[in-house]
Image (cartoon, grey):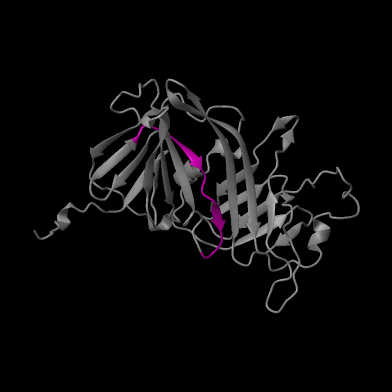
Amino acid sequence: MSTTIDRTVLITGAGAVTFSSATLLTPGQIVARVNQTEREQVVAGYGTINRRIQDNHIRVTFPNHGFMSAAILAALCPTWARNPSLGTSLLASTDAAAVINGMDGKKVTIHNAILSRLPSLYLGADKGVFEDQECEILGLLAKTTARTNAAALYTQASEAWAKTITQSDYQSCGYTALWGTGPGQSILAEKGWTVSCDLNLDVKTTADVGSYDVRIMGATWRARCQPYNLDETVWTLQLHQGTGAAVGSTTLQSKDLVITADAVGGVNVTLHDASWLVGDGRQQWGTGVLRVGEIGFVANRKFNTGVPGEMVTIAIKAA
């Protein structure tokens, strides 16, 4: 018997994600997985005879295109990550959905979704702000819904592809950076700055329900670049010796790192109370190498009369 194939049954095609009122396009693949935890039922002499469900949830990952708008910025850099209230739930009183639309007219709706990994921001003229930066969306059990419900995690349906592209939302431009004021230290990047956020999330579970809530336990904001205008004095800026260098001294110098877009539509970023990252700023001597290697800063909380403020300020540059 000969082997045949019907090419019409091959299911392929690109898609887009709608999340938090923003349409998120991608230059690559959207990958959605159901992560399931199981426990093995073991009997002596027989080994594993069964596996039983303990928990499951959905994780969606995809690289972003470089488009930027107020809705995209709010979705991918939410205020709860810039100024986290530690120990609080990230899930609202009403579930927020993430919808994956395929160009083939099919869609998957994840009913209870939260951004679980923020994409880095790239601030440079050679790429868009979120271009090629991967993010992750976590989908949990819908609120007050039993896992035996046919729509406990997601639903599938048909919906005609209706996404559009607004080319003016794509913005790449040059950036300048200043650490401190009066006059402050100018830092010129060879390419661009990468601003990233590492989240510490606590997924709450119970034995009979599994995962049902996400709490934020911490967020760390960093900014890195390869400078081309710094020399040996970088070690002086980092206070490795002299006044302020005693063991036990603070690394804070009450200086913000302000990265400013050259053009309207770019993104202005301020890391508050930015201190140098340990080990960055190496000096190097060689033909064709810059004197100072990659440098980085980490944001810290600023307190106003005892009230903590946001660690990072991010805003689209207005006209």
* Residue for point 38% across, 28% down: 53
Provide the residue span drawn in magenta.
110-126
* Residue for point 57% across, 27% down: 88
Residue 197: give x, y in percent of width and height: 59, 45
Residue 43: give x, y in percent of width and height: 40, 26
Left or right: residue 26 compared with residue 226: left
Left or right: residue 97 compared with residue 10: right
Residue 135: give x, y in percent of width and height: 47, 47
Viewer-side residue, 271 vs 156? 156
Left or right: residue 98 compared with residue 278: left
Q: Is residue 126 above or below residue 288?
A: above
Instruction: Report if residue 2 lies within the magenta region.
Output: no
* Residue for point 49% across, 46% down: 73
* Residue for point 64% across, 53% down: 223
Seen from this angle, which residue lies furthest left?
1
Residue 221: give x, y in percent of width and height: 63, 45
Viewer-side residue, 57 vs 277? 57
Q: Is residue 231 above or below residue 73?
A: below
**Which image quadrant is residue 123 in?**
bottom right
**Which image quadrant is residue 310 in?**
top right
Instruction: Report if residue 117 lies within the magenta region.
Output: yes
Seen from this angle, which residue lies furthest bottom?
287
**Which image quadrant is residue 166 in?**
bottom left
Viewer-side residue, 166 vs 151? 151
Seen from this angle, which residue lies furthest front?
45
